[in-house]
């Protein structure tokens, strides 16, 4: 799947499937990704400020150069 920067804000993505998606350079500030499948998703360069990743599956996700300030659920993600 290929996802460009969304044309509008995604306030809720709870439980959604984004595995393998190209979501780089997106604005995902304050999005609720709780329980979402983000395995192998490319979120590099994205704004993740205040987003909720509680119980999200982030195995293999690329979070390089992201702004994670205030986000929750990323404490154990390298």
Image (cartoon, rainbow, N blue to C red):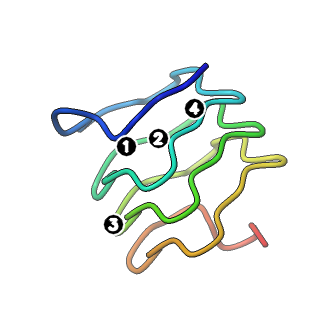
Residue nearest the viewer, comparing 76 with 10? 10
Pointers 1 and 3 in contact (C-beta within 8 Å): no
Q: CA distance from mark 1 to mark 4?
A: 9 Å
How far across and how far down the image is residue 14, in percent?
44, 29
Is 49 rendered above or below residue 21?
A: below
Q: Residue at x 44, y 61 (%)?
A: 46
Neighbour class for label 4 at 10 Å: few (<14), some, many (≥20)?
Answer: many
Which label sits on residue 33? 2
Q: CA distance from mark 3 to mark 4?
A: 16 Å
Q: Residue at x 73, y 50 (%)?
A: 61
The residue labelled by disc 3 is 50
Is 70 rendered above or below residue 77?
A: below
Mark 3 vs mark 2: which is more N-terminal?
A: 2
The residue labelled by disc 1 is 32
Say which element carries label 4: loop
Neighbour class for label 1 at 10 Å: few (<14), some, many (≥20)?
Answer: many
Q: Residue furthest left?
A: 8
Mark 1 vs mark 3: which is more N-terminal?
A: 1
The residue labelled by disc 4 is 36
């Amino acid at each position: 799947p290929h996802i460009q920067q969304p044309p509008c804000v995604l306030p809720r993505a709870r439980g959604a499937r984004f595995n393998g998606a190209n979501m780089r350079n997106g604005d995902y500030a304050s999005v609720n990704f709780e329980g979402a499948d983000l395995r192998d998703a490319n979120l590099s360069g994205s704004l993740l400020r205040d987003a909720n990743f509680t119980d999200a599956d982030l195995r293999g996700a690329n979070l390089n150069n992201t702004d994670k300030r205030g986000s929750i659920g990323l404490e154990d993600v390298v």
